[in-house]
Image (cartoon, helix red, strand yellow):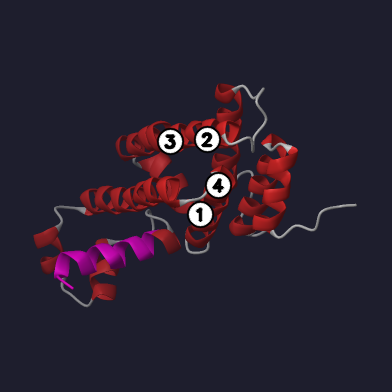
């Protein structure tokens, strides 16, 4: 692994664990096993490192979303896979990281705002259209309203104000809100499929 990639991997791991404010360039260099001089040869300052780390995090999600949309059998499988992907990321992501970027790095946060619109909201709308065309989601859904509702659910799950980490495990929050959403938009046919994917016992 080249030095720059190793720095990125180390920095992203530390940001995800401790947030961005409390992690210094010295901390990153030490954990990476290099000198601060070497670190600054690859990254001008901490801000540039935060920018690149966030882009890598967002691009990882974008690549998954594109692959997930084309390779899944139906809209519900696509949504369940998305839930599992976010769960896996949530296990190693301290929500403080996003909170601190929004508060202390507003220019960097603009990329998150674009991601919310161009990837998350767009992907939700496409999934809703897909599910409706497959007969798995109700035909009378208002796509704009329902998509925005789902987006707000996801954002709330990552907000430590709504779900503080000392009281809630983010992956469990994601499970609950996603299950609630799927069963809320699904037809009877969709419910049967959802029960299989989510391993829910159908109530008699």
Which numbered disc covers residue 86?
1
Q: Which residue is mark 3?
A: 116
| Label 3 Cα crowd, 10 Å radius (few <14 / some 14-19 / many 20+) | some
- Name the element at disc 4: helix
Residue 100, percent from left and from top: 43, 47
Q: CA distance from mark 1 to mark 2?
A: 21 Å
In the image, which is nearer the foreground, mark 4 or mark 1?
4
Q: CA distance from mark 4 to mark 1?
A: 11 Å
Task: Tell me the distance, in whole angstroms, between the alpha carbons under discs 3 and 4.
Answer: 16 Å
First in sequence: mark 2 vs mark 4: 4
Q: Is residue 7 left or right of residue 41?
A: right
Residue depth check, mark 2 versus mark 4: number of the one nearer the observer: 2
Q: Secondary structure at mark 2?
A: helix
Give x and y (percent) for residue 158. 54, 47
Q: Nearer the viewer, mark 3 or mark 4?
A: 4
Work out whether mark 4 precedes mark 1 in sequence or the reverse, and give the earlier one: 4
Residue to which mark 2 is pinned: 130
Residue that label 4 marks: 79
- At horizontal 71% and vertical 60% (from top left) the residue drawn is 199
**Residue 173 - label:** none
Measured Cα–Cα span from mark 2 to mark 4:
11 Å
Q: Residues within 10 Å of mark 4 (few under 14, many from 20)?
A: many
Q: Which residues are magenta?
A: 1-15
Rendering coords of residue 164 (x, y %): 63, 52
Name the N-terminal-most of marks 3 and 4: 4
Residue drawn at (64%, 25%) of the image? 141
Q: Residues within 10 Å of mark 2 (few under 14, many from 20)?
A: some
């Amino acid at each position: 692994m080249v030095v720059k990639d190793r720095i990125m991997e180390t920095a992203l791991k530390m940001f995800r664990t401790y947030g961005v404010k409390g992690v210094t360039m010295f901390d990153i260099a030490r954990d990476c096993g290099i000198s601060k001089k070497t670190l600054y040869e690859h990254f001008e300052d901490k801000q540039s490192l935060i920018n690149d780390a966030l882009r890598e995090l967002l691009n990882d999600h974008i690549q998954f979303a594109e692959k997930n949309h084309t390779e899944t059998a139906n809209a519900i499988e696509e949504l369940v896979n998305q839930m599992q992907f976010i769960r896996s990321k949530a296990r190693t992501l301290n929500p403080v990281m996003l909170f601190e970027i929004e508060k202390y790095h507003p220019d960097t946060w603009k990329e998150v705002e674009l991601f919310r619109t161009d990837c998350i909201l767009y992907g939700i709308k496409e999934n809703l259209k897909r599910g409706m065309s497959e007969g798995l989601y109700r035909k009378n859904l208002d796509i704009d309203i329902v998509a925005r509702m789902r987006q707000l659910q996801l954002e709330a799950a990552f907000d430590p104000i709504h779900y503080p980490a000392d009281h809630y495990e983010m992956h469990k929050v994601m499970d609950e809100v996603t299950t609630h959403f799927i069963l809320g938009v699904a037809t009877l046919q969709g419910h049967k499929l959802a029960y299989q994917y989510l391993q829910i016992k159908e109530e008699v």
